[in-house]
Image (cartoon, rainbow, N blue to C red):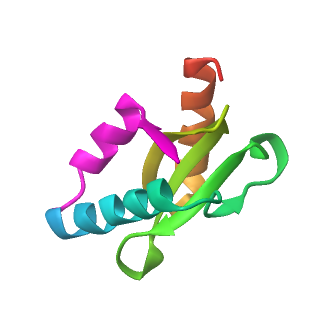
Amino acid sequence: MKIEPTEFFIEAVQKLDSSERRVVLKSVRKLELSIDWLGKRLHGALHHLRSLRTGHNNRLRIVYVENEGTGILLIVGERKDLRVYSRAADILRELGL
């Protein structure tokens, strides 16, 4: 599958420590190599997004959108307080997707 990271995703990955960064990049690689979209589909206003668990103890989420056969990686962050999902919604509006 074709994967395109956004600048927001790249910045978020760079802020992670090196061991967690490796785990996240390994998950991105799994997504690239899979034949089906991974992660769970979100609900409500974010129903067209997917969330993939990653990081140590699955504490992080990679939030991405499927767009014409390409996975656009929006953001990676902690699920805590659901901030990663609200940030993903903001990024989606900013990108106009």
Magenta segment: does it hold 63? no
Q: Residue 78: in sight, yes or no? A: no
Residue farthest bottom in this picture: 57
Outermost residue toward the right in this view:
44
In this view, the residue in front, 39 or 36, is 36
Q: Is residue 50 above or below residue 88?
A: below
Q: Position of residue 73 (x, y in %)?
A: 48, 42
Quarter that holds the C terminus: top right
Give the x, y percent position of residue 52.
55, 62
Q: Would you say 51 lies left or right of 20 here?
A: right
Q: Residue at x 46, y 76 (%)?
A: 58
Give the tally of numbered discs: 0
Q: Is residue 77 visible?
A: yes
Outermost residue toward the left in this view: 18
Q: Residue at x 31, y 69 (%)?
A: 23
61 sits left or right of 69 in the view: left
x, y percentage for residue 13?
Answer: 29, 49
Q: Is residue 82 left or right of residue 76?
A: right
Instruction: Work out whether 84 lies above or below 23.
Output: above
User: Can you say whether 50 is above or below 22 in the image?
Assistant: above
Q: Nearer the viewer, residue 10 or 87?
A: 10
Query: Residue 79 placed where, x, y %?
Result: 53, 62
Looking at the rendering, which quadrant does residue 70 occupy?
top right
Residue at 60 percent of width and 59 percent of height? 35
Segment colored magenta: 1-17
Residue drawn 74% across the image and 55% down it: 42
Q: Nearer the viewer, residue 83 or 16?
A: 16
Q: In the displayed structure, would residue 42 be above or below residue 89?
A: below
